[in-house]
Amino acid sequence: MKKTIYLLALLLFAPFFSEAQDIKTLDRIAEQYAQKTFPLLQSFLRLPNDANKPLAYEANMLWSEEVFQDRGFKTTRINTAAAPLLLAEKVLDPDLKTVLFYVHVDGQPVDPSQWEQENPYEPVVKKQNDDGQWEALPWDSLLNYKDAWRIYARSASDAKGPVIMFLAALDAIKELGKNPNFNLKIIVDFEEELGSPNLPLAVLENKELLKADNLVIFDGPQHRSNQPTLSFGARGIATAQLTTYGPIVPQHSGHFGNYVPNPALRLSRLLASMKSEDGKVIIPGFYDGIVIDSETEKTLKSTPFDKEGFMDAVQIAAADQVGSYYHESIQFPSLNIRGMQSGEINEKARTIIPAWAKAEIDVRLVLESNPERLLRLVKEHIEKQGYYVIDRIPTKEERLTYPKIATYKATVSYQSFRTPFDSKIGVWLTKSMKRAFDKEPIRIRMSGGSIPISPFVLTLGIPAVAVPTVNPDNNQHSPNENIRLGNYRDGIKTMIALLTEKL
């Protein structure tokens, strides 16, 4: 009986794998495997995966090894100075080309008090009610889910959801007796949310093991319209920590205000001196080398952006003026203050002059800018403001010698990457997406976010393209992260089409 059903399935789904490109059949396959894999998604999301907790990766590593081994992949742990990478490999024919797929399974920290559910690692199905509020549903309601419903949990979208979509697609084509016409390698990263600090060296030391012809990244949200999307590049990232100093210990603001310098005020002035009122970096030379020619501008303007809808969604009245429109703005490096700290606030506030003030900075990188040069420009700017700049805590002698001292520590995580739309991988992926959705995907020249792909591109010499599948309003990195169920199903559909598209 089972064999008969299997043969009928082959006959039923055969048109999809023919030139007829039967989209309705592909929809049915994707729907079937969305339902089948909801329990697998639930079990995966239940595993805590805070990238800042070194031991959190092991349970996720064991889970990942098991699911890929069950699907006939050979797995290898690639050791690093911290969490290992996992390589899953399936060689179908040594003469075929190889596609390397990148995924990550680590997540951002969670503060349960900020979530609208008791445990961020216990996935909850929710639907939006008539008042616009998200209300919980029983898990078994997924048997008759609606596209707009969502599953809330840490890493639901970033990026455990896409991992399960990929596994579902592998299961679907196996049941139908199909194989890709290329070999598969999957690299699983457990430190992406830390900037993958150990990835560049691991790729360099394992070039032969990771050797491939193309790289596909399953990470990131779709275009804000939530339409099928391909992203052909991403900015890189560097980080810096800047600290200014006042008294060796906090001092009473009544006794010593107007006399003892305040490090928080100094830090505020120092940071403000780096950017104009409209958000442009005013450190000389920061944007050098960036040229938006007519052909690039045509490409950028071909990618839709609903400015009015975006402003309404994030509730801002005006945008910064780096570039005259959104997609132009992210072609430039950025200088962002991602956090500040000095003294105390709210119920812990005290009448003191703080001992220090600290800012965390991220610099988003583009291909035309040298990362080390940008970080050096920031340091030189600090020095020009009269600061004695060091990379450690100052000594007593230094405190007594220099009126203004700053600690500046900077690190380059990884560079940007960019792949042409008309590259072989770009044409292949565009064709697969068009076959799945009967329309051209939205193609993005370069996304503003960062993914640790340049070590593969530069070291292995292969082109890379990201295939984002999750909803753009997924709250990644924030409380109440979620994945929209219509996106989950369509993500499976995308990956089945990709795996069955001739390379």
Image: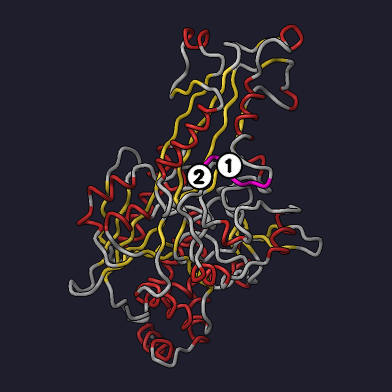
Residues 335 and 287: in front is 287
- 371 over 439 or under it: above or below: above
Q: Is residue 125 left or right of residue 383?
A: right
Q: Secondary structure at mark 1?
A: loop
Residue 128 seen in this snapshot: yes
Work out whether residue 145 or residue 89 is closer to the camera in this orientation and state it: 89
Question: According to the image, label 1 marks what residue?
Answer: 282
Specify the label residue 294 is tagged with: none
Query: What colour-coding does the image apply?
Result: secondary structure
Residue lying at 48% horizontally and 32% vertically, measured from the top left:
379
Question: Seen in the image, is 220 located left or right of residue 190?
Answer: right
Q: Classify mark 2: helix, strand or loop.
A: loop
Q: Judge the density around disc 1: few (<14), some (14-19), many (≥20) Cα neighbours within 10 Å.
A: some
Please identify the dominant SS of the magenta region: loop
Task: Look at the image and say whether residue 282 sits in the magenta stretch.
Answer: yes
The residue tagged 2 is: 286
Give the quadrant of the C terminus.
bottom left
Residue drawn at x 61%, y 70% is 304
x, y (%) of residue 32?
50, 76
Seen at 33% across and 81% down, the residue is 502
Q: Which residues are magenta?
A: 278-286
State how many labels appear.
Answer: 2
Residue at left offset 58%, top offset 61%:
483
Residue 217 placed where, x, y %? Answer: 41, 62
Choose top left, top right, bottom left or bottom right for residue 376.
Answer: top left
Verify whether residue 467 appears in magenta.
Answer: no
Taking depth in this image into account, of 22 and 40 the one nearest to the observer is 22
Q: Is residue 56 above or below residue 447?
A: above
Marks 2 & 1, CB-CB < 8 Å contact: yes
- Identify the amino acid type marked 1: Ile
Q: Identify the image quadrant of residue 20.
A: bottom left
- Residue 35 appearing in the image: no
